């Protein structure tokens, strides 16, 4: 029952749909927000992990011999997700590949160079992340933007009836990936805190630099979609922006979460437009 005298933050978050988002995502994210680990353990992890990350980031940049262990990193993450991360968080992680892939492919389909390479990263299970790697997630974005090139010659906006929505799909996650184990007790944000230093350690310095700065291209994707649809309000969905300003490891967790929410909001917006387009 909603308390009008002492309203709950979570009740309003569950009700407000001003920003478009899939209902299952809202439900999973609210479970994460209310998780006991996020309320307690996460804050301690953030303090310790940020110190460790900054130290690792500094050392990786000054040591002349670079090393990486992509497969080891992927295996560690997948194992940890299976056994310790709550199913709702795993659902959000798997979904992120789908939403960003759809957005990238939507931009390609509606651009001058529609033959540019598209994303094929659509993992349905946690094991699929061994091939749909976290490294490839950034590489696909950079390759797509490089292939698309300048926006100067684009014929945007596109007439509503001519917009190509074929790359916007429903997200299909295998239910086996969401089957809970009794050991799964770590929420989304705490899991990121625990692994962000390992991510830096097992990548080369330039790979990590590319990874954390790929978040800044949220603004690029939003503006391209906005110009395709003549929908300037889409720029209000962006938190990470201005890719010419290179960022470091500070506030990484916040930018990472906002990146995930951005792709969910934009994907839901496009999915609703696709459904409306189909009915008309």
Image: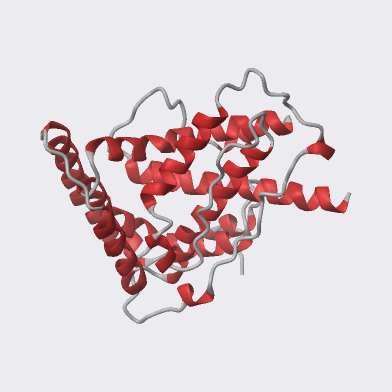
Say which residue appears at 28% left-offset and 58% top-offset. Answer: 71
Q: Farthest front residue?
A: 115
Q: Farthest right residue?
A: 280
Percent x, y of residue 29: 49, 60
Q: Farthest top residue?
A: 152
Percent x, y of residue 217: 48, 33
Q: Is residue 134 left or right of residue 122?
A: left
Percent x, y of residue 86: 40, 70
Is residue 186 visible in the rendered image? The answer is yes
User: Hey, which quadrant is residue 234 in on the image?
Assistant: top right
Q: Is residue 3 above or below residue 209?
A: below
Say which residue appears at 34% left-offset and 36% top-offset. Answer: 210
Q: Is residue 80 above or below residue 202?
A: below
User: Hey, which quadrant is residue 107 in on the image?
Assistant: top right
Say which residue appears at 55% left-offset and 25% top-offset. Answer: 149
Percent x, y of residue 122: 53, 58
- Comparing 105 with 250, the one in front is 105
Is residue 231 visible in the rendered image? The answer is no
The color scheme shown is secondary structure
Q: Is residue 53 above or below residue 185?
A: above
Say which residue appears at 62% left-offset and 48% top-offset. Answer: 267
- Comparing 252 with 135, the one in front is 135
- Comparing 178 with 206, the one in front is 206
Q: Is residue 257 left or right of residue 172?
A: left
Q: Is residue 83 left or right of residue 115?
A: left
- Comparing 184 with 36, the one in front is 184
Numbered label tally: 0
* Figure quadrant of the N terminus: bottom right
């Amino acid at each position: 029952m909603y308390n009008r005298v002492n309203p709950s933050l979570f009740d309003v978050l569950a009700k407000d749909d001003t920003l478009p988002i899939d209902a299952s995502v809202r439900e999973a994210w609210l479970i994460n927000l209310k998780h006991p680990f996020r309320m307690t353990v996460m804050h301690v992890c953030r303090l310790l992990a940020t110190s460790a990350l900054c130290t690792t980031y500094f050392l990786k940049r000054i040591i002349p011999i670079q090393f990486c262990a992509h497969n080891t990193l992927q295996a560690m993450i997948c194992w940890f997700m299976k056994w310790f991360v709550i199913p709702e968080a795993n659902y959000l992680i798997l979904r992120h590949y789908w939403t960003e892939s759809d957005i990238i492919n939507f931009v390609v389909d509606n651009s001058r160079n529609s033959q540019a390479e598209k994303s094929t990263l659509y993992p349905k299970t946690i094991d699929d992340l061994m091939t749909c790697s976290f490294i490839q997630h950034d590489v696909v974005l950079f390759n797509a933007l490089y292939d698309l090139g300048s926006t100067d010659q684009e014929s945007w906006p596109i007439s509503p009836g001519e917009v190509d929505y074929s790359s916007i799909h429903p997200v299909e996650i295998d239910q086996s990936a969401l089957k809970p184990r009794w050991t799964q007790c770590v929420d989304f944000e705490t899991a990121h805190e625990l692994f962000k230093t390992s991510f830096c350690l097992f990548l080369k310095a330039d790979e990590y630099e590319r990874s954390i700065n790929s978040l800044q291209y949220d603004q690029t994707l939003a503006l391209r979609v906005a110009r395709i649809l003549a929908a300037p309000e889409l720029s209000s969905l962006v938190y990470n922006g201005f890719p010419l300003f290179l960022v470091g490891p500070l506030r990484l967790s916040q930018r990472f979460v906002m990146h995930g929410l951005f792709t969910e909001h934009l994907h839901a917006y496009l999915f609703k437009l696709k459904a409306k387009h189909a009915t008309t």
